[in-house]
Image: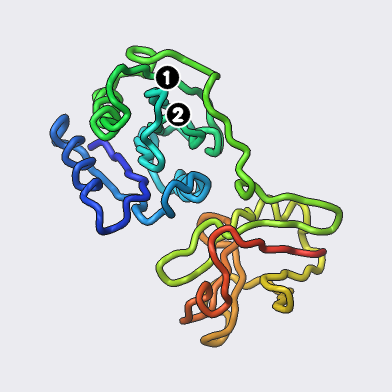
Amino acid sequence: MQIISLLSDWQNESVYSAWAKAALLSRANDLQIIELCNQVKNFELAPGAYLLNISFSKFPKGSIHINYINSDQKDKQILIALANEQYIISSNNGFISMLDNIENVWVCNTKESPFNYINLAAEFAQKLSAGNHPDDFAKATKDYINLNEKYDMPSLAGNMLTGHVMHVDGFGNLHTNISKAYFDKNIGVRKFTLYLRKHDTHNTLQTHYNDRPETELVIFFNSSDYMEIALNKQNASGLLGMELGMKVIIEF
């Protein structure tokens, strides 16, 4: 059974998610549709790309992921990308450029209205799920929008590593773009001080939410190997005043 995940900024109040699922199922009824997230902040591509990047390892090879964030583009181009042995469908809005391990990209030109993206994405997903290769109905390309998002990747300057909050989950936990590999490469076992707010500093890593008493702060690398910041049994975002896009600075 073909797995297709949906990523959107439609929020729970919208009917668009139901429309997208209906468009897919009307073309193939043997699909397993998973809503990866429909709570991405409106039009924010970088946090959406982050969520997909940390999710690739959770999906089997051959899975198809459809991005609906900021999908109504005037150029009417729809892209198909291959990354991590999985396919991604997105409008040509810069989303593809933020994904990890992109191997190939194809462009599907269409004369239809960009507002018909839900149906067009379903059409191309159906072709892929039926075993068609993108070369059969699209053209390979390297010419697509490439965005250099301001908090897409962590940065390093001297002894300061700067990351950002890329996602706040339903518990208020803060998910950053600092991967364990990046941390180990640049900091490793050296002593460090992590700054969340001007006077809020921390210098130890834990391995789980329960490594500290309830209400105390924990910093660890989660199952996706990205740094997560939480308050045990509390809402870190609300109590720490940390929101999407805010800086996480580590001095070492």
Residue 108 is situated, as x and y percent measured from the top left of the image, at 37, 19
Residue 57 is situated, as x and y percent measured from the top left of the image, at 46, 46
Question: Compared with residue 211, is residue 128 higher up or lower down, i.e. above or below?
Answer: above
Q: Quadrant of the N terminus?
A: top left
The answer to whether residue 57 of the structure is visible from this angle is no
Disc 1 to disc 2: CB gap under 8 Å? yes
**Residue, disc 2:** 92
The image's mark for residue 107 is: 1
Q: Is residue 177 left or right of residue 118?
A: right
Q: Quadrant of residue 147?
A: top right
The amino acid beneath tag 2 is: Asn
Within 10 Å of disc 2 (Cα), the crowding (few <14, some 14-19, many 20+) is many
Q: Residue at x 43, y 72 (%)?
A: 171
The amino acid beneath tag 1 is: Val
Q: Quadrant of the C terminus?
A: bottom right
Q: Quadrant of residue 129?
A: top left
Q: Is residue 154 left or right of residue 85?
A: right
Give the SS element for disc 1: strand
Question: Compared with residue 133, is residue 169 higher up or lower down, i.e. above or below?
Answer: below
The first of marks 1 and 2 along the sequence is: 2
Within 10 Å of disc 1 (Cα), the crowding (few <14, some 14-19, many 20+) is many
Question: Compared with residue 189, is residue 46 higher up or lower down, i.e. above or below?
Answer: above
